Amino acid sequence: MRIPVRSKREPGIYGPNAVSFPAYVTGFFLVGMPLVVITIFSFLSRGDFGSGVIRKFTLEAYRTVFFETDLMGNSSFNFTYLHIIGRSVLLAFTVTLICLIVGIPTAIWIALQKKSTQRVLIALVTIPFWVNVLARTYAWMLLLSEGGLFDKLGSPVLLYTSWATFIGLTYAFLPFMVLPIYASAEKLDRSILEAAFDLGASGWRVLIRIVIPMIRFGIFAGIAIVFIPALGAYVQPALLGGNKVMLIGSLINDQFGESRNWPVGSALAVLLLAMTGLILLSTRRRKLEFAS
Amino acid sequence: MRQRAWSVSNLPIIRPMGVSSLIFLYLPLLTVLIFAFNKSEDATTWGGFSTRWFSTILDNTDLIRSAKVSLSIAIPCALIAAMIAAGLAIGMGRATGSVQNVLRALVNAPLVLPEIVTSVGTLAFFSQVGIPLRYGSLLFAHVVMCVPFAFLPIRSRLRDFDENIFEAARDLGASSFRVMTKISIPLLIPALLSSGLLSFIISMDDFLTSLFVSGPETTTLPIYIFGLLKLGASPEVNVIAALLLIIPTLGLLVGITWTATRRRSNEARHQ
Amino acid sequence: MVDDSGWADLVISGVSKSFRDPKGAEVKALAEVSLNIPSGEFVVLLGPSGCGKTTLLRSIAGFEKIDAGYINLGGTRIDLLPPHKRPVNTVFQSYALFPHMTVAENISFGLENEKIEKREIKSRVAEVLELVEMRALSERKPSQMSGGQQQRAALARALAKKPKVLLLDEPLAALDLKLRKTMQIELKRIHRATGTTFLFVTHDQNEAMALGDRIAVFNSGQLVQVGTPFEIYTAPTTEFVANFIGESTVLTGSIDSRTFTGEGVKIQQIPNQIADGSAKKIIIRPEAFSLFSGKNSVGQLRIKEIIFAGDALEVLLASSTGHEVRVKSDVSILAQLSVGNEVELFVDAAQIGQIN
């Protein structure tokens, strides 16, 4: 005797399924809908009095980002916005790279300590992460300003330059890089390293051929969670860079504030969203390659 | 401990890099801490030890008001976010429906999306639906931001338990509701506390979402401080920054010590 | 739960269940399994890991939904009920005690789920604690007990519900050998004392032999043989069963006028129940053979390996075609054996069985 399969839904193992409903409702309305709304806004026209939009479909916002039209009506690439986007990508890339160079050895170093030391060191890496980002940014204002510690030590005054933004971002996101890499390095089987040394490999070879490949998923995760927020950063460029150099975060902020062009702001946000999606996909695909 | 054939120093650069990282992470924080006790009127030049600037911030009514606004959001936000996150972790079980996967991805999206995108999105959504930018809208904007973070400790604690425990409860005749109230929630209490603490700190710290979604009467502490920072360094800001550093750090240290003692006493009991 | 023995037979009929492996391919965990278990019997589900025995147990408990077939208990179909509505209880391999509750609280949890009076709960908790000899530890938390004690607590918790069928999922696997032996005897005592149907999953054939009134042998999702331990051991119906339970020599060849020829050996006086024919498989247990002396000579075979097992000798012989023959012998002949020499092999033909 055969009977058909019943509902495929697993009964809640920890409790009724229904209690996850509030999370789904808030997720749908307060995360999903806003993403839909800005996507729609990016295809609408600018409101008459600056703020808001009027419901008329147009590609104007995207055209503004990519092209400019001269008095004769000829279109050409508008490099102002493209420059800003390119500069933001370059900055985020450099920050990620430096975080990698510093973060990978740091995470491995921590993971190879004994357990109790590991806990202390991880707490030390985590604490700055919980200190208000404004306080952390301010610390660098204090160090890099005219008359600040670095000035007194003879360094040029870096505050309100791109260097300051770069330092501030690296500082803010280094813990983001160390933590996921540590999480995979901690699972490293020490006997594998011992075996590599036993087979006569040099320290560098063990690091590059054994350790780094084994912690690559931590590294991919670290790249994603540093690059993405660095790309959309607002606080550090505003306070340390003095908003002298426009980046995509401040540009979006301006479109929703001073410049009052919500469609353009939305179009920029959609572009940032698309870039985020690309990064997430490319760091995740690696995992699938390994699995198959 | 057993003597090992190799030591950490066999791997090149990891020790110097690790030590430099810690210096890099703590040098700025120490500077802020020290300069909060600076006597001088000049924020960046050391003029001797004094606690004089600490008293001035108590007279700063704008600062106090914005701190109250932040607390009035962060406290309920922590409670609501921990509850919603616990509901998600408990209710989703091992379910793998595709609709649920999409919804869960949305709930977790604030973890990975640049905050500037979610915050302008929220502003656009509120304006489109006609929700005024008041206390409630800001509170819920904070809640959705905190839920994915609050979810992490709860989920990982649930995963730590043997799934058979929950099956055993069903097997012994408990409805799924009773499994939740008698087994899941009691076992989750420590995780719920860390979720709440996590959400509280995130809400207190948040700047960008608050910047876009707050109205005139909901100026939070970070928004107020951002305004001050735009004007540059000052002795008063030194003190505020130092407090922003000390308070969560102390909170964290208390939390870490508490879990460490618990772990130690648990380990002792297992022996 | 009312004790309606006689009506509490467990009937498993045509049960199938498939899973998807991580690559998405379908894996049949149970293929049309049918099994009748009369009330009060101690049945052991035996098989290698991944053979479907645990899936069957979890399907009866309600943790897996079966794709086809049905499960009846006492005349009522139970496979459509959620786990908490089924009159069966499980003892998990990991014990699965609630870590935040004492032993007594663990046991009363199950009783509180049925609207039972407080006083009744108390007396039932005391009763089962007595049964498993855990009275003194009733206020301990799981983390304060040894594995064996946790095992007894888990057993008590399930028995307190007075299940119609008690499902035991490799409950002794985590215990060391000595404790396992003690617990096996305990389980038999408890089974007799309660009269409950026990359905016990294990991959350990010795445990299965020691415990079961009947053994159901599983292999890759199929129920291959059901029978008493004696039947399973002496008359395995397939080569898998023959090799999984105990050791044996399987020979393929032809039988003609009560003589088997094949794999380089010739055996006379084949029992009458094994019909003549070609491509026949016969199975001979190691203890059916003897060396040097006996009634029915198989001929001279070369010694391949000698394994001293304390109370017995295991001798591996090779036939002229190289086929391996396993012999269990008395240790007294050890001095007469050496690897590479030939020795005369005898067999007690009455113990020869046939497999398909």
Image: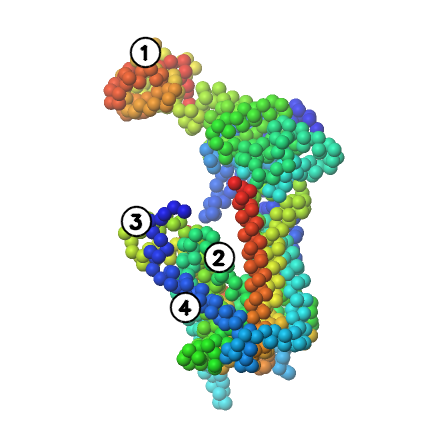
Residue type, label 2:
Val
Q: Residues within 10 Å of mark 3 (few under 14, many from 20)?
A: few
Residue A142 at x, y = what percent?
50, 76
| Residue identifier under label 2 | A120
SS at badge 2: helix
SS at badge 4: helix
Residue B56 at x, y = what percent?
63, 76
**How much space separates mark 2 and mark 1, taking CA atoms?**
74 Å
**How much space separates mark 4 and mark 3, taking CA atoms?**
32 Å
Q: Residue at x 69, y 74 (%)?
A: B217
- Mark 2 or mark 3: name the one nearer the start of the chain: 2
**How much space separates mark 3 and mark 1, taking CA atoms?**
56 Å
Q: Nearer the viewer, mark 4 or mark 2?
A: 2
Q: Are marks 4 and 3 in contact (CB under 8 Å)?
A: no
| Residue identifier under label 3 | A198
Instruction: Please report, as a chain letter, where disc 1 is located.
Output: C
Q: Nearer the viewer, mark 4 or mark 3?
A: 3
Q: Nearer the viewer, mark 3 or mark 1?
A: 3
| Residue identifier under label 1 | C293
SS at badge 1: loop
Marks 3, 1 in one chain: no
Q: Nearer the viewer, mark 2 or mark 3?
A: 2
| Residue identifier under label 4 | A98
Residue type, label 3:
Asp
Could you say which quadrant of the image residue A286 lies in?
bottom left
Residue type, label 4:
Ile
Instruction: Please report, as a chain letter, where disc 2 is located.
Output: A
Q: Are marks 2 and 1 in contact (CB under 8 Å)?
A: no
